[in-house]
Image: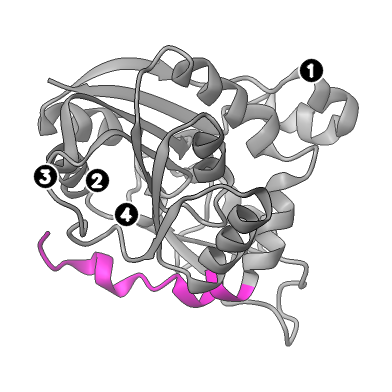
Amino acid sequence: MSQNSNDLLNVKPVWNQTAIDYHKFTRARDSYSLQIERPAIEAIVSNLEFQNVLDLGCGTGHYALWFARRGAQVTGIDLSAEMLSIARAEAAATGLAIELREGDIRKRLPFDDCAFDLIFSATALHYIEDLAELFHEAYRVLRENGNLLISALHPASTGLFPTIEQDYQDEGAWNLKYFNRARRRIFAPWSQARPGSSDAPPDIECYHHRLEDYLNAIISTGFVLRTVREPYPTESLAADNPARFAYSSSQPLSLLLHAQRS
């Protein structure tokens, strides 16, 4: 992959500093991951056949372990050594064998051509500037008729993120800027530290991609788009956390894209 400003977006220190907090946040009963994203992912995956799975930006192994429980051979790659350390501990505790590699998915993937029959990624693509480059790499390492399943932060959500010139603590900065592709910045919402405190992690910088950016990048790469989902929160979230349910039922937070290599 070519060298571009992806290389200037260094989120690694944030992920290393907040790995434990993130692990707890995403596995909480009322997490958006469990109550919005995962049921929709499970519904799509239930109709797919696969043996070798590549998890791009696997983090602490939430989905990598889930695929392994389904009998798949799973390889996960992530930028953060701390996140991978948690994933390894989880795998050891459950007796699941998964291969975990430290690496940057913004660069050429360290895998042979046609090595996997399913490539999966959850909430990682807003750190990628050039989506087409990543999808070209995914196409390369997928086998013929292999599947690509992406869960991204919905553009309606990332379009609200302040640009790097704005102060995210200023309420006025959170107005929708959908057509502005400028780099965005937020404070890690899963961190137990308060913004501005001495133990607070650095701001997270990321990218806002519009819906057409995701779809055109996938189609232009050669994939055949099979499914587009904007999942609605489960009713159990309404019982567990009414405030989160009210927020997530008023606007889409996740975008699921399933495509197949032709």
Residue sitting at 45 percent across and 38 percent down?
Answer: 152
Q: Is residue 37 above or below residue 49?
A: below
Does label 2 or label 1 sit earlier along the sequence?
2
Q: Residue 186 is drawn in which quadrant?
A: bottom right
Q: Residue 72 is drawn in which quadrant?
A: top left
Give the percent coordinates (x, y) of residue 129: 27, 55
Residue where numbered disc 1 is placed:
235
- In three-dimensional space, the C-alpha distance between marks 3 and 4, rounded to whole angstroms, equals 21 Å
Amino acid on which the number 3 mark rests in the picture: Asp
> Residues at badges 2 and 3 in contact (C-beta under 8 Å)?
no
Secondary structure of the residue carrying numbered label 4: loop
Residue where numbered disc 2 is placed:
131
Does label 2 or label 3 sit earlier along the sequence?
3
Secondary structure of the residue carrying numbered label 2: helix
Please give the count of numbered marks on the rendered protein. 4
- In three-dimensional space, the C-alpha distance between marks 2 and 1, rounded to whole angstroms, equals 33 Å
Q: Is residue 76 above or below residue 155?
A: below
Residue sitting at 58 percent across and 30 percent down?
Answer: 37
Q: Is residue 193 visible?
A: yes
Q: How would you rate the neighbour count of disc 2 (Cα within 10 Å): few for under 14, some for 14-19, many for 20 or more? A: many
Does label 3 or label 4 sit earlier along the sequence?
3
Amino acid on which the number 1 mark rests in the picture: Glu
Does label 4 or label 1 sit earlier along the sequence?
4
Residue where numbered disc 4 is placed:
128
> Residues at badges 4 and 1 in contact (C-beta under 8 Å)?
no
- In three-dimensional space, the C-alpha distance between marks 2 and 3, rounded to whole angstroms, equals 19 Å
Residue where numbered disc 3 is placed:
113
Please state the extent of the stretch shown in magenta in the rendering: 1-17
Amino acid on which the number 2 mark rests in the picture: Leu
